[in-house]
Amino acid sequence: MIAKKLVKVVFVKIIDEKGKLFGFINIIDLFIVVLVLAVIFVGVSIVRNRGQVVSVKQDKDIELTMIFRSVRSEYVSFFKVGDVVKRKETQGAIGEIVSVEDFPAETIEIDSEGKKVIAVSPRERDVKIVLKCKGRASSDMVATGNEIVKVGQKFGAITKWYEGEAIILSVKVI
């Protein structure tokens, strides 16, 4: 009983009958002021702690060899020396085509005896391109633009006239 009266007296002293905290400020107004101050504090912290942009020299000559598998024959002419290849996902320029080679597309099929054989497609071609790029290289990675490139990597590529998926066959730092 005494505890209930003590809690009631303390509670009444903190929040009076008008809903004011210590008889001075409305509790909802206090909440809004605290919220505004928190937003200002977070905003100032973000602006003050903003990271610096670092520029990395792209001073290495890099040669990339890529292959586009099973390209329709009529599309082979869309791979042209001098065209720029970009990464499909980021639209970042990778390099310039310096050579184009096409040959019949090969697939693995199962013959009538159940053995795997290499079959040549009469309608599709594999297109191998070599790109000349400017980039950077270190002991653990090679990059052109903002793109890290690795042998075996599947690569959504766009040229001026063609879009498709390529596989990187070789990466050489010249």
Image (spheres, rainbow, N blue to C red):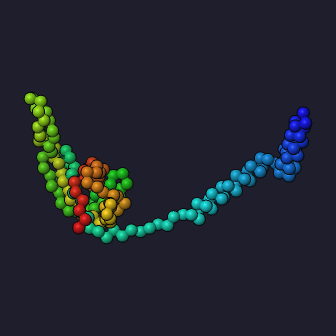
Tell me residue 137's x, y (percent): 31, 65
Residue 171 falls left or right of residue 12: left
Which residue is most to the front?
Answer: 2
Residue 80 is at least partly visible in this image: no
Residue 60 falls left or right of residue 15: left
Q: Nearer the viewer, residue 94 or 27?
A: 27
Q: Residue at x 74, y 49 (%)?
A: 31
Quadrant containing the N terminus in the rendered view = top right
- 14 is higher (above) or lower (below) than 81: above
Which residue is most to the left?
Answer: 113
Q: Residue at x 28, y 55 (%)?
A: 150
Quadrant containing the C terminus in the rendered view = bottom left
- 60 is higher (above) or lower (below) than 80: below
Task: Determine the image quadrant of residue 61.
Answer: bottom left
- 118 is higher (above) or lower (below) than 59: above
Q: Nearer the viewer, residue 13 or 50?
A: 13
Tell me residue 80's x, y (percent): 20, 58
Tell me residue 153's x, y (percent): 28, 51
Q: Residue at x 20, y 46 (%)?
A: 69
Q: Residue at x 39, y 68 (%)?
A: 56
Q: Nearer the viewer, residue 52 or 137?
A: 137
Tell me residue 63's x, y (percent): 23, 62
Task: Determine the image quadrant of residue 121.
Answer: top left
Residue 3 is at least partly visible in this image: yes
- How many numbered discs sit on the rendered protein? 0
